[in-house]
Amino acid sequence: MNLDFAKQGGLIPAIVQDADTNKVLMLGYMNEEAFKKTQETGLVTFFSRSRNCLWTKGETSGNCLHLVSMAEDCDHDTLLVKAHPDGPTCHTGTDTCWGEKNVSSSVSFLADLQAFINQRHAEMPEGSYTTSLFKDGTGRMAQKVGEEAVETVIEAMAGNNDRLIYEASDLLYHLIVLLTSKGLSIEDVTDDLKKRHKVSKKDYPHQH
């Protein structure tokens, strides 16, 4: 990185984001020494303007920020720091300095599942059920999607919500496997849903 510390009197803003949830946790300032210490220790370190010294987040509270990555902006004078927080980030005890809860959406797990299935498709480890589906081919994968869809419908009609969720989970999993085998992903499906939603926000624009 080619950071311009001189541009703003030796300090650059450092926006800290949770590496898992993408929630913005806090804003601090780094000088070149704080930047280097962050790199060396793996613990996010700032320069305190009020105390005129370095401080590592969590050095007194224990709520450290474990560095995942740092990226400079287009003007080389601001940092985006991604980290894993140990507990609340704000000194007031809240998850973020804006009083927000730092929780990930359950729906975001679909991206993690897609990444896992992508890895299985690339590595094809022996003994993996996902690997066996890829090896069995499109016909078998499509059959599993059909079977799980039927079972989802059956449980919906039976009024058994616990079983409905179980079968719907199986359906989503097998659908992602099928999409992956075709070079597609669950993100392609959500992109299509977004496009349809923009057409009409009054109802789902189903097209044949």
Image (cartoon, rainbow, N blue to C red):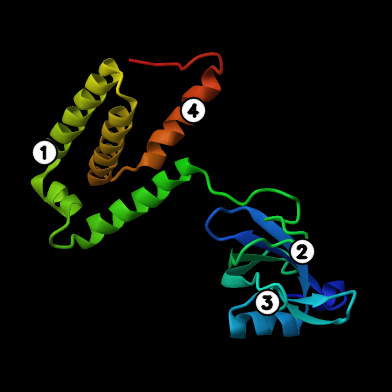
> Label 3, on which residue?
2
Residue 52: name its quadrant.
bottom right
Res. 205 mark: none
Q: What's the distance in space between the residues labelled 4 and 1, CA to CA?
A: 30 Å
> Label 2, on which residue?
91
Q: In the rendered image of this protein, does residue 25 appear above or below residue 144?
A: below
Tell me whether the residue at label 1 lies in contact with that at label 2, contact meaning CB atoms closer than 8 angstroms. no
| Precedes in sequence: disc 1 or disc 2 | 2
Neighbor class of circle 2 (other Cα within 10 Å; few <14, some 14-19, many 20+) is few
Neighbor class of circle 3 (other Cα within 10 Å; few <14, some 14-19, many 20+) is few
Q: In the rendered image of this protein, does residue 160 appear above or below residue 73?
A: above
Residue at the image position 16 percent from the left and 35 percent from the top:
144
Assign a secondary structure to mark 1. Answer: helix
Instruction: Give the foreground label among 4 and 2.
Output: 2
Residue at the image position 32 percent from the left and 15 percent from the top:
208
- Taking the image as shown, residue 180 lies to the left or right of residue 102, namely left
Q: What's the distance in space between the residues labelled 4 and 2, CA to CA?
A: 42 Å
Neighbor class of circle 1 (other Cα within 10 Å; few <14, some 14-19, many 20+) is some
Instruction: Give the foreground label among 3 and 2.
Output: 2
Assign a secondary structure to mark 2. Answer: loop
Res. 195 mark: 4
Q: What's the distance in space between the residues labelled 1 and 2, CA to CA?
A: 54 Å
The x, y position of residue 135, in whole percent, is: 11, 50
The kind of residue on which mark 1 rests is: Arg
Q: In the rendered image of this protein, does residue 9 appear above or below residue 131?
A: below
The kind of residue on which mark 2 rests is: His
The kind of residue on which mark 3 rests is: Asn
| Precedes in sequence: disc 3 or disc 2 | 3
Res. 140 mark: 1
